[in-house]
Amino acid sequence: MGFIETTLSSFVSLIPVTLAQSLILSFVVLGIMIPFRMLSFPDLTSEGAFPLGGSVCGVMLVAGASPVAAIAAAILAGFVAGCCTAFIHLRFRIHTLLAGILVMTMLYSVNLRIMGRSNLSVFGNPTVFDWVPGLQGGFPASKIVVAGIVVLAVFALLYFYFKTEKGTAMRAVGSNPDMAEAQGINVWAATIGGIGLAGAFSATGGALMVQSQGFADVNMGIGVLINGLAALMIGEAITGKQTVLRQLLAPFVGAIVYYQLVSLCLAAGMPPPDLKLATGLFVLTMLALPSLRRGRGPAAARETFRE
């Protein structure tokens, strides 16, 4: 069997696993998209909120809580983490990136305190993936069904929310906070609520991942931000970002395509340690392309950042 045939065979066999994983991690991509695109709030909290959600979920499961209660607790914890980032930025005028770094750094210690150790096994505990009739909970099919249903529900709720008055107000704050405030919109409430919502989605991804893989680890968030950015850029390249519908589709489409590309690279023989280098180079290329098209001056760089 030749190289191409071997690669394709390995890739096809990995599709169900990577599809389940991409649906779960699409919540992290969503948690990255909302601050970046909807609120113009570059944020790094997702890299801390993701393991926070996993830690809370793991501890709740070990304590005997139901899988849904564990996910709900993780969502609440992620929401609080996001609200803290937004509050630090608004109250103390600290740059959004630095505020996110501060919260992300502190969450590492918080996660260790929550679990009492660096990792926690939840094997043998019930999960939401056990609830699909006729499918075994530990197999990709059940994970795809459950994660797919949650993705569809979240997408529908977000689409209708961003069409409401409050959702439109949140988008207005991201577009022009001064004008939004002049129109009577509470900028603090919209910003804190939006960043909190993003943290909640990242924590949801962490909770689902822990129930999927059977353990929580304090380092499970390392690299998730750069992977999420790469997925978001792929999704936006496919769906566009001109409308709310397209912008909401981008995280889910991008996550699926990105993790299938990662699977293809692994099937082709790329060493796993090289994946982060390849992902970083891809994100750098996507960020640099608009600047290269318009020229290399400072004005072009500022325009690229605003986009």
Image (spheres, rainbow, N blue to C red):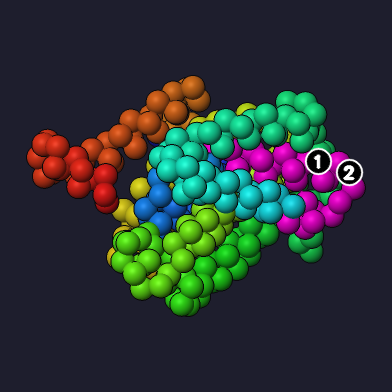
Q: What residue is at 40 percent from the left and 49 percent from the top? A: 41
Secondary structure mostly seen in magenta is: helix
What are the residue bounds of the magenta stretch? 47-72
Judge by depth and name the residue closer to the eye, 64 or 136: 64
- Disc number at residue 59? 1
The answer to whether the residues at label 2 and label 1 have Cβ atoms under 8 Å apart is yes
Residue 99 is a magenta residue:
no
In the visual, does 284 lie left or right of 36? left
The residue lying toward the viewer, choosing from 213 and 195, is 195
Residue at 56% of width from left, 35% of height from top? Answer: 104
Vertical placement of residue 201 versus 156, above or below: above
Picture quadrant of residue 134: bottom right
Residue type, label 2: Ala
Write the residue at 50% across / 39% down: 100
Relative side of 58 to 93, left or right: right
Find the distance from the CA under tag 2 to the CA under tag 1: 6 Å
Q: Mark 2 points at which residue?
A: 63
